[in-house]
């Protein structure tokens, strides 16, 4: 089934145009599809923290949440009817689609069969959205860049 952006906009009352170019650039830096192994979330968080301030990460989190909600509602019928994944699996699926970047998100919006196929692949990982949890920002920054940590912590 071919999906048109006009249908996406009509169904969600949203566009993708309010997702910043910086958000999409961040997905390239993190490179979620290429991360493997049991520590893929911590590796992604380290990349994110290495390149961005806490305030910028919080803005990305807001954009991620908006995009996630739009995709959740848009693909909900396909999930309920054509995908054999749990609630948690659906969350991981949508998160992996977002983590794969703008081009992949657009391809998925053009063809829901691609989403269904992706849901059955072994490329879906637990959960790109977790990289925006900031409770350990301070300790990770201190580990990877002690000078920047000190500067941010003490306003130097």
Image (cartoon, rainbow, N blue to C red):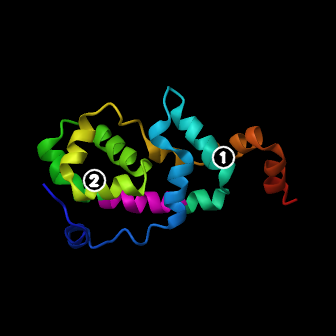
Q: Which residues are magenta?
A: 60-70
Classify residue 74 as left or right of residue 17: left
- What's the CA distance linking mark 1 and mark 2? 32 Å
**Mark closest to the chain's N terminus, 1 or 2:** 2
Q: Is residue 38 above or below residue 125?
A: above
Residue beneath the point at 50% across and 52% down: 27
The kind of secondary structure element at disc 2 is helix
Which quadrant is the C terminus positioned in?
bottom right
> Residue 147 placed where, x, y %?
84, 48
Tell me the residue that label 2 is attached to.
108
Name the one closer to the observer, 76 or 103: 103
**Outermost residue toward the top?**
38
Residue 86 in view of the camera = no
Q: Residue at x 21, y 73 (%)?
A: 10
Q: Which mark is residue 137?
A: 1
Say if residue 103 shows up in the picture.
yes
Marker disc for residue 156:
none
Specify the quadrant of the image occupied by residue 68: bottom left
- The 10 Å Cα crowd at callout 1, few under 14, some 14 to 19, many 20 or more, is some
Q: Is residue 39 located in the magenta-colored stretch of the structure?
A: no
Work out whether residue 62 or residue 25 is closer to the camera in this orientation and state it.
25
Counting from the top left corner in percent of width and height, residue 63 is at: 46, 62
The one nearer the camera, 73 or 7, is: 7
- Residue at 78% x, 44% y: name it: 145
């Amino acid at each position: 089934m071919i999906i048109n952006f006009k249908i996406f906009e009509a169904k969600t009352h949203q566009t993708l145009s309010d997702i910043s170019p910086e958000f999409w650039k961040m997905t390239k830096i993190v490179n979620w599809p290429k991360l493997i192994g049991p520590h893929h979330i911590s590796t992604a968080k380290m990349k994110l923290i290495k390149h961005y301030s806490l305030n910028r990460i919080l803005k990305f989190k807001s954009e991620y949440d908006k995009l996630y909600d739009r995709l959740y509602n848009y693909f909900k019928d396909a999930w309920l009817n054509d995908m054999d994944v749990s609630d948690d699996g659906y969350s991981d699926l949508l998160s992996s689609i977002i983590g794969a970047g703008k081009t992949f998100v657009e391809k998925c919006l053009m063809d829901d069969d691609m989403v269904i196929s992706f849901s059955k692949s072994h490329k879906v990982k637990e959960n790109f959205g977790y990289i925006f949890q900031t409770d350990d920002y301070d300790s990770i920054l201190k580990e990877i860049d002690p000078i920047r940590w000190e500067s941010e912590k003490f306003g130097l």
